[in-house]
Image: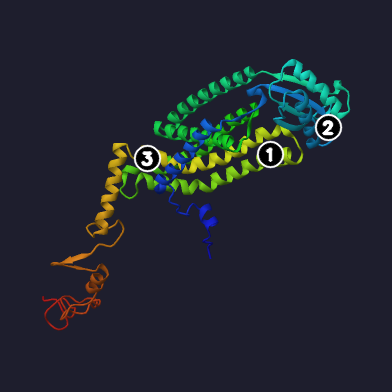
Amino acid sequence: MAKTGLASRLYRGEADLNIVGRRKLWFAVAGALVLIAVLSFAIRGFSLGIEFAGGNSFQVPASVGTLTQAEDKVNAALQAKGGGIEVVTAQKVGSTSGEYYEMRTPQLSAEQANAVKTEMAQEFGIDADQISGSQVSEAWGSQVTDRALLGLLIFIAVVAIYLILRFEWRMAVAAIASLLTNLLLTAGIYSLVGFEVTPSTIIGFLTILGFALYDVVVVFDKVQENTRGITANNNTTYGEAANLALNQSLMRSLNTSVVALLPVGGLLFIGAGLLGAGTLKDLGLVLFVGMAVAFLTSILLATPLLVLLKNQDPRISAHNKRVLARRGAIARGEVTPKGAPRAVVAGDEAIDPEAAALAGAAPKVGARPAGKRPAGARGGRPGGGGNRPGGGKRR
């Protein structure tokens, strides 16, 4: 017996999930989330790393104690000599020379930085030469941002040209809208939760664009296959064919996303969480969030938006109207579906085809049996060729 569970039907593309038909719901949800993200940008802003906001960084040997103990002592030194500021971020970093704790603080003057460094050495009971410090200007972060925006514009332009040549301009518009929504929602999560934005975050943003594009192209390729020559028949609307393509490629997209999220999750939760590799946290976090959002936008937003754009095409609009009109005629009994037996009309009454076939097979009253005539018989007379008994030929 064939399995009829949801997972089995998803693998066969037979789940019949009405994704395109509920596009108004997905658009409303996406619009609300984008609005929340934009409001978060305006009200909360972003938690910018030292590379973007500017500040100081101090490296303390990991041998002084735990990360929490080191952070507390650095905060005490900052309270005494740094004007009451506190550590912004603290993480454990490993290098060829050994492990150390990196403490990042807001901007300090040169005199304040030297005084804090001396106070930290006293707090930890180590030589001041074992503590290294550096100052980062916010101008470097501005340069990174400008180049990232330039790279984003170039990427979108190249993607638009590729999609127009590979598919059509409506698919290019739907795909780019999905990509931009993915970026806005991912950035909104960063703003709402307060994740720190670093150069690794910017790199991660550019990386998830490629993954999101791949997922959209896979779905659009199936949509193009299902809708090729669709106007030649009046059985399926463009939206129904696109929805079927979504169901057929849904499990593939899900498997691709899960396979991609597993190593990224390992990078984030094991590398950064358990092993304390702080440098992997920023990159792993944006990849994990962005890839998860990319799967949702490619399924729930890109294809429904494509259907909305295609329905504005006069040729597709006329085709959809023909399909719906034909279905209405079938429902009213005015048209017989293709492949269905037609009714036989006798006078003013419609006779069921099966009953008509049985009636035609039954013998009429007074008719001769439909049996096989005897061999040699002609007109019901005995064979012989003549009128006389014996059937001899007249000479």
- Distance Cα–Cα, label 2 vs label 3: 58 Å
Say which amino acid is labelled 2.
Answer: Ala
Image quadrant in which the C terminus is located: bottom left
Residue 62: mark: 2
Q: Earlier in the sequence, mark 2 or mark 3?
A: 2
State which quadrant residue 122 falls in.
top right
10 Å crowding of disc 2: few (<14), some (14-19), many (20+) = some
- Coloring scheme used: rainbow
At mark 1, the secondary structure is: helix
Residue 203: mark: none
Give percent across and percent down for residue 54. Answer: 66, 21
Say which amino acid is labelled 3.
Answer: Leu
- Distance Cα–Cα, label 1 vs label 3: 38 Å
Up/down of 96 relative to 238, above or below: above
At mark 3, the secondary structure is: helix
Q: Earlier in the sequence, mark 1 or mark 3?
A: 1
Up/down of 267 relative to 87, above or below: below
The reply to whether residue 54 is in sight is: yes
Residue pointed to by mark 1: 268
10 Å crowding of disc 1: few (<14), some (14-19), many (20+) = many
At mark 2, the secondary structure is: helix
| Front tag of 2 and 3 | 2
Residue pointed to by mark 3: 308
Residue drawn at x 57%, y 37% as measured from the top left: 192
Give percent across and percent down for residue 338. Answer: 30, 56
Residue drawn at x 41%, y 38% as measured from the top left: 306
- Left or right side of 240 for 44: right
Asked if disc 2 and disc 3 are in contact, CB closer than 8 Å, the reply is no
Up/down of 78 relative to 289, above or below: above
